[in-house]
Every structure is written in C-alpha cells, then in structure tokens.
Image (tube, helix red, strand yellow):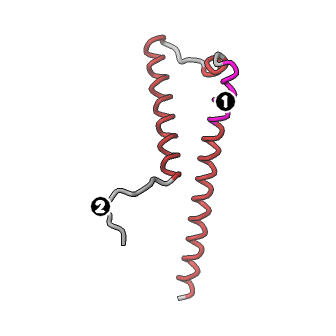
Amino acid sequence: MKNLNEAPDDWPLGNILWFAVLVWFSSSLLSQSAYIAIHGLPYDAVTMLESLGPFYYLVLLLELVIWGSLIFMGCLKFARARRTRSTGAGHVAGV
C-alpha cells in the first residue's frame, strides 16, 4: 500500500495537459483584460497572429496539438470510465 503522505514520483500526462490549458486560458484572459484596460477595446487576435509572419503557422499548429491532445485525453478517459462502469455493472447483476 502506498504512503499517502509522500509526493508522487511523477505527474500523469493528463494532469500536466490540464495545467497547461489552465495556464494558457488564464494568461489569455489576463492579457485581454490588460489590453482593454489600456486601450479601451479588445485586441484583434487574427491581426496579432498575422504579424508573427511565418511563425503564425507554428503557433497555430501548437494550439491545434494542444486542443487535439485535450480532446484525445478526454475521449480516452470517457472510454475507460464506460468500460469500467459496464464491467462493474456486469458483476453486480451476476451477484
């Protein structure tokens, strides 16, 4: 049995991904709020991304990978939960 008072050796990939999404969302929200406070209008994300030039595609690809990973992890977790639930229900019905 594991000692619950000890820190885990490594964090699961799912937790790291959720933390990355949370940091990304929070920083985006704070950035937009600061820009509105200074200029009075929200910034145009498309114009900002286009100003990056060829790096625009790298940023777009990175965001697609993050969202794809998040969707994949969510589907995987949902599938595991369904499989566990259906396996557990079979055992209960058989008793």
Q: Which residue is most to the left?
A: 5
Which residue in the rendered view is the most extreme toward the bottom? Answer: 95
Q: State the residue in front, 12 or 86.
A: 12
- Does 76 appear above or below 62? below
Dot 1 amino acid type:
Leu
Q: Which residue is mark 1?
A: 58
In the figure, 66 relative to 83: above or below? above
- Taken as a whole, is the magenta stretch helix, strand or loop? helix
Give the residue at x 43% y 15%: 37
Q: Position of residue 80 (x, y in %)?
A: 59, 64
Name the kind of residue labelled 2 in the image: Asn
Q: Could you tell me residue 39's position as x and y percent?
A: 48, 11
**Residue at image mark 2:** 5
What is the crowding at mark 1: few (fewer than 14 residues within 10 Å), some, or many (at least 20)? few
For residue 43, the mark is none
Q: Which label's residue is closer to the chain start, 2 or 1? A: 2
- The magenta region covers 53-63
Identify the residue shown where x is 66% and y is 29%.
Answer: 58
Residue at the (56%, 65%) spot, across then down: 81
Image quarter in which the N terminus is found: bottom left
Magenta segment includes 62: yes
Please give the name of the residue rendered at 48% of the width and 12% of the height, measured from the top-left corner: 40
Q: Residue furthest front?
A: 9
Quick one: 73 or 88, which is closer to the camera?
73
